[in-house]
Amino acid sequence: MREASSTEVRDDISIVLCGEAGQGIQTVEYLLTRIFKLAGYNVFATKEYMSRIRGGMNSTEIRVSQRRACAIVDRIDILIALNSGAVRHVKERLSPETIILAEKKGLGEEFGRGHYNFIDVPFTETASCIGNKIYSNVVAAGTICGLFSVQLAIVTGCVKRFFSAKAKDVVQRNVKAARAGYVIGSGLQNSAGMKIDVGSNLSVKEELLLSGAEAVGLGAIAGGCNFVSSYPMSPSTAVLVFLAKYGNDFGVIAEQAEDEIAAMNMAIGAWYAGARAMVTTSGGGFALMTEGLSLAGMLESPIVIHVGQRPGPATGLPTRTEQADLELVLYGGHGEFPRIILAPGRIEDAFYLTQKAFNLASKYQLPVFVLTDQYFLDSYYNTASLELSGLRADKHIVKTAKGYNRYELTDDGISPRGIPGFGEGLVVVDSDEHDTGGHITEDLDLRVVMVDKRLKKMDLIKTETVPPELVGPENYKTLVVCWGSTYHVASEAIKTLGSDDISLLHFRQVYPLHESTAEYLKRVREVVLIEGNATSQFGRLLKLQTGIDIKNKILKYDGLSFSVEEVTERLSGVLGST
């Protein structure tokens, strides 16, 4: 076993905490990300975890950077190993430069071969002296803060706020644990030669620190959401929890339904009554909702559906990530009816697109999807304040008169939408095919008219489709295409390559596609598609809509997200072979 040597001075440090569920890793993640932001550091965090309440192996990555950091990296600069399996769990990500902070006696024979850059830190012993080994995670958090020379007042202030609901003596012991860890970390700068020099920027202190789930929730509130009905299912549950937590502050009723079928029908009923409702679910839960989705299509009911993707089929890997439900939401529901699918790639996208989803659903009277995934929902970083001016909740509701027809035929297919009790008209809807008044019909000629009426909306929808974002030069020679959560990983990978003739085309709306899509793809011969599934679902959609078949594909479907290094390496390999 060798001791740590002086580390390379970097402006971007990747810290990974690894241990079992139940060891308080998320507590350390919460504390460190907020402490670092208040200290003026750019911060990014994400996690990977097993589907267990206790045991198993979980890890959290925290990037602390002088510049904006918004993507996961494989590199581990500092590993805090909280149990004997931690090193083995992240072994492939370790390098000779990785500093491992751990207790030797708790790691068994992990270090028997003597090739790890290891520092023995008495996390548990220190915590036990304070009163209980349960405080060892806070000792670890304090140690990292000491290494970075964060002001101690910021550290203790965050610890006090986090544990403020606990008994006074518990708060005091956690503060004591943080102080003890801070002393250890400060001492390591000298005794172990660990030099960390990440520049800070005090303006970061005032920025927002949001997860993807929180951004979706805030976007729903900004969109006028006042009812959410769902059945808990990872990773989408975080959105339900967020809206339930702040429901009283913003007039949102959060209903945990008995199952996904009930949740979907509740939301449709809420829109019928004049509310603005959302369901949040994952692939398996949405599978149960597809009959209700088709009902919304027939009723021409607005509804916003958030789907947080995870690997299937069936239960699959319930706490992992994937982009394999695109075709599920695109083709889900029996019969033919229009829909819109939005796929945010940045935290701010999640806010603005979710807000927009409510207005689109209300205007066009159809289902609008916000499609995310576990990696996106569980990741967070600091971002500039969200711009609220100009955001409105457009209701598109009319006061009905006597003789009102819910499905009045119009040039654009959009009928004036009334709600019960607002005006003198009777608002009739039915799941069977119906006439303009909403009454059941088996007139086959009228059936054709009503199908055409519903589908006619797509012509108007296409006029306000969100365009893809081009990152890089207009005169590119190679175009990298991605959608949804791969935005930051792909853009950082391209920057790492350092080529001035590669651009990124990112899609925030994947259906219907913007009219400029084919033009971007036809400019060059070298197009590379990146997506997190096995069958290139977005590639198939691009071919269907544009006739262009992208041959070069970088796909991943092992349940983990792409990393910057992985995309960089695989992109280099694809470009080198063409």
Image: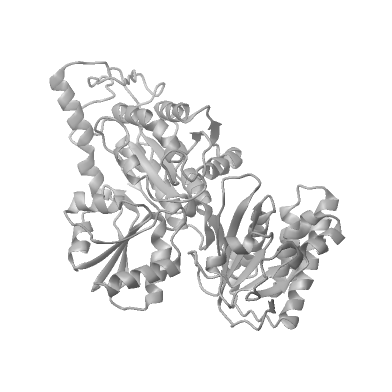
Identity of the residue drawn at 27% across and 49% down: 464
Q: Quadrant of residue 30?
A: bottom right
Task: Quarter of the image for the N terminus: give it.
Answer: bottom right
Across and down, in percent, residue 39 comes to 65, 70
Q: Nearest the camera: 275 or 537?
A: 537
Compared with 429, 285 (above or below) is: below
Q: Is residue 390 visible?
A: no
Q: Relative to residue 246, is residue 324 drawn left or right?
A: left
Q: Quadrant of residue 292?
A: top left
Compared with 323, 91 (above or below) is: below
Across and down, in percent, residue 487 comes to 39, 61
Q: Nearest the camera: 103 or 467?
A: 103
Identity of the residue drawn at 43% across and 42% down: 306
Task: Quarter of the image for the C terminus: give it.
Answer: bottom left
Compared with 524, 387 (above or below) is: above
Q: Residue furthest left?
A: 445
Q: Relative to residue 571, is residue 221 drawn left or right?
A: right
Across and down, in percent, residue 520 comes to 22, 63
Colour scheme of the picture: one colour
Identity of the residue drawn at 18% across and 53% down: 546
Across and down, in percent, residue 243 comes to 55, 41
